[in-house]
Image (cartoon, grey):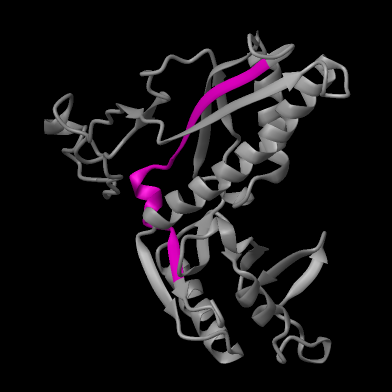
Amino acid sequence: MYQPQYRQMLQTVFEARKAFSRAMAPLQILDGVQHNQKAFSVKTNNTPVVIGEYSTDANAAFGDGTAKSTRFGNMTEVIYADTDVEYDYSLAIHEGIDRFTVNNDLNAAVADRLKLQSEAQTRRANKANGKFISDNAAETKTLADFQETTVRALFNELSKFYIDNEVVAPVTAYVSAEVYNSIVDMAANTNAKGSSVSIDDNGLVRYKGFAIEETPTKYFEKGVVALFVPDGIIIPFIGINTARTIEAIDFDGVQLQAAAKGGTFTLDDNKKAIVKVTGTVPGA
């Protein structure tokens, strides 16, 4: 049984190679989960925050209102609900390692395959997470082309969107190569004019207040060229059913098998701050 080793490898590889990295909270991973088990329950709360006025009336909490009133206004009860989170994709490994042909120590081969499978599973999770973000974006914008003026207008519009909606968390723009190159190559971004693009923060490109992260096209849904997401609002999770080797019957070796399932979660309120940008890539 290799659940603990597979869990550690998968968690390490995911943190190193995950896409949409700043949007993601740390990966939640469990081993030994059952087939029909829900991922986990989170405490959610839809109670609106009511901001009232503090009363200074002589009969509020004092005088005639003693023990019958309050200067803080009407009290709203805060109640948290338990929200079950479902797994929404599965992962599986089924490989054979023959002692006669593998040309390596059997245990070393198992360790190497689990590492390589962790990388493959991370790419699978990246694709699933990109779909989750696209599907849950509350706003959709369309980029007509990748010209400097068009891209600048988009970023200006979204800068206003996040300011007007009082989104206080930093926001990262996950962009295709076309959008990324348009930003970096903008004629306006010169030292003489006071560049709007900074690459001084450990190579991090920033534009119009957004961190810019170039993201492989394969992790976007078809037609999507950028995703704007506040940092840390999405929880990725993976549950490992099993990771094992069993002695093979048809050859001198073992069958390496693993099964896991994963998913992604964010609060409904946070979906309002996710923006999807669609466009057509030339030649696609």
- In this view, the residue in front, 247 or 179, is 247
- Rendered-image quadrant of the N terminus: top right
Q: Relative to residue 28, is residue 275 drawn left or right?
A: left
Magenta stretch: residue 128 in it?
no
Task: Look at 69% across and 69% down and name the residue there.
Answer: 206
Tell me the magenta residue range: 255-277
Magenta stretch: residue 271 in it?
yes
Task: Look at 52% across and 25% down and name the residue there.
Answer: 260
User: Looking at the picture, how far across and down is residue 221, in whole percent?
Assistant: 47, 60
Task: Look at 65% across and 45% down and name the residue there.
Answer: 18
Task: Look at 57% across and 59% down and name the residue there.
Answer: 218
- In this view, the residue in front, 125 or 100, is 100
Q: Relative to residue 205, is residue 81 drawn left or right?
A: left
Count of marks placed on residues? 0
> Is the residue 188 above or below the residue 128 in the image?
below
**Residue farthest to the left, as pictured:** 64
> Is the residue 117 above or below the residue 16 in the image?
above
User: Looking at the picture, how far across and down is residue 127, in whole percent?
Assistant: 53, 49
Whether residue 172 is visible to the viewer of this picture, yes or no, is no
User: Looking at the picture, how far across and down is residue 96, in whole percent?
Assistant: 68, 22
- In this view, the residue in front, 67 or 242, is 242
Dividing the picture into quarters, in which one does residue 2 lie? top right
User: Looking at the picture, how far across and down is residue 196, in whole percent?
Assistant: 70, 80
Kindly report the secondary structure that dominates the magenta region of the rendered protein.
strand
Q: Relative to residue 255, is residue 271 drawn left or right?
A: left
Whether residue 64 is visible to the viewer of this picture, yes or no, is yes
> Is the residue 209 above or below the residue 126 in the image?
below
